[in-house]
Amino acid sequence: MRTQSSATTATPIAVTAPPEARGLGTAQAALGVVAFSLTFPSTAWGLESFGPWSLVALREVLAALVAGGCLLAAGVRPPARRHLAGLAVVALGVVVGFPMLTTLALQTSTTAHAAVVVGLLPLTTAVFSALRTGARPSRRFWLAAVAGAAAVLGFTVAQSGGALTAADGFLFGALLVCAAGYTEGGRLARVMPGWQVIGWALVLCLPLAVPAGALALAHEPVHLGFHGVAGLVWVALGSTFFGLLVWYRGMAAIGIPRASQLQLAQPLLTLVWSALLLGEHFTAAAPLTAVAVLVCIAVTQRS
């Protein structure tokens, strides 16, 4: 693994990378989407054993310990001061904000309804990217992105009966903070390895996560079971650490707006996992929506 000092002197990976790099970046971003698609079902499992605040804090502590161990073993130097503000945005967005808000929402919302968040996330991330990095995708790109987001949103709302719940405030808040964290993390991943971006963001949260976890465990009941422990392990190591690691590497190679459109497939993957792991049932609209989403993804990748 490269240390940060060597990474920052190298030429940043941009959207003009060679075809081989773009292909690898697409594969990495797609692998991140698969990891993320298990987040909501795993969170639902985790809530079987832990309270929402305990689950979020333990998730951050476990992921931060693994990330810190990797950074220490690789001899990575602390990030430059100019990167601290960006890392703080990543930490607040994807390490703290999104997990906390979606976990609170999943106490009363189904995973299908929560999938509205990730259905709108690609479009929101593209907007944040345009504002933050100056990216200017084509009109065809935006039309395909809006169409894909509309298809996913329509499908997930239909699956939840079209009713809005009190959890919607948490879900839309999670959408905004996650898009900001994705955008800033993708920008930083062009000047340092992606695993270091999420690694340092996790480590920055550790001083707050440890006392928060101790406080939450003292006030929330714990009923350990296979589902609860497995859900905690996955959201900590699979979604938070590994998923964000490959996701940021992918965004650095193919660009933030294009990578974000791969997430249009995430709600449908989440619905599949929810059916397999949670026993939820869905209508025949799923394959039709999947086809529409795949078409939109193909258009954005060629724009």
Image (spheres, rainbow, N blue to C red):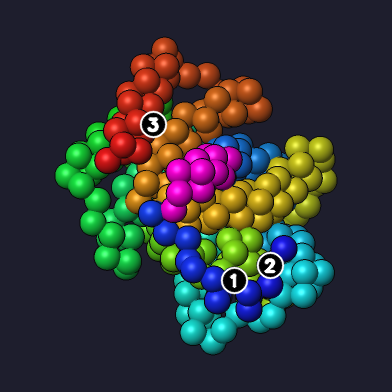
Q: Which mark is residue 206?
A: none
Can residue 105 be seen at all in this image of the molecule? Answer: no
From the image, which quarter does the N terminus lie in? Answer: bottom right
User: How many angstroms separate mark 3 from mark 1 (CA)?
Assistant: 41 Å
Q: Which mark is residue 7?
A: 1
From the image, which quarter does the C terminus lie in? Answer: top left
Q: Identify which residue is drawn at 77% across, 69% down.
A: 74
- Secondary structure under badge 3? helix
Q: Which residue is mark 3?
A: 156
Q: Main secondary structure of the magenta part?
A: helix
Q: Earlier in the sequence, mark 3 or mark 1?
A: 1
157 drawn magenta? no
Q: Magenta residues, as a range? A: 17-31
User: How many angstroms separate mark 2 from mark 3 (CA)?
Assistant: 41 Å
Q: Identify which residue is drawn at 66% across, 51% down.
A: 242
Q: Earlier in the sequence, mark 1 or mark 2?
A: 2
Q: Position of residue 58 (x, y in %)?
A: 72, 60
Q: Which residue is mark 2?
A: 2
What amino acid is labelled 2 in the image?
Answer: Arg
Q: Identify which residue is drawn at 66% across, 81% down.
A: 78
Q: Position of residue 93 (x, y in %)?
A: 48, 64
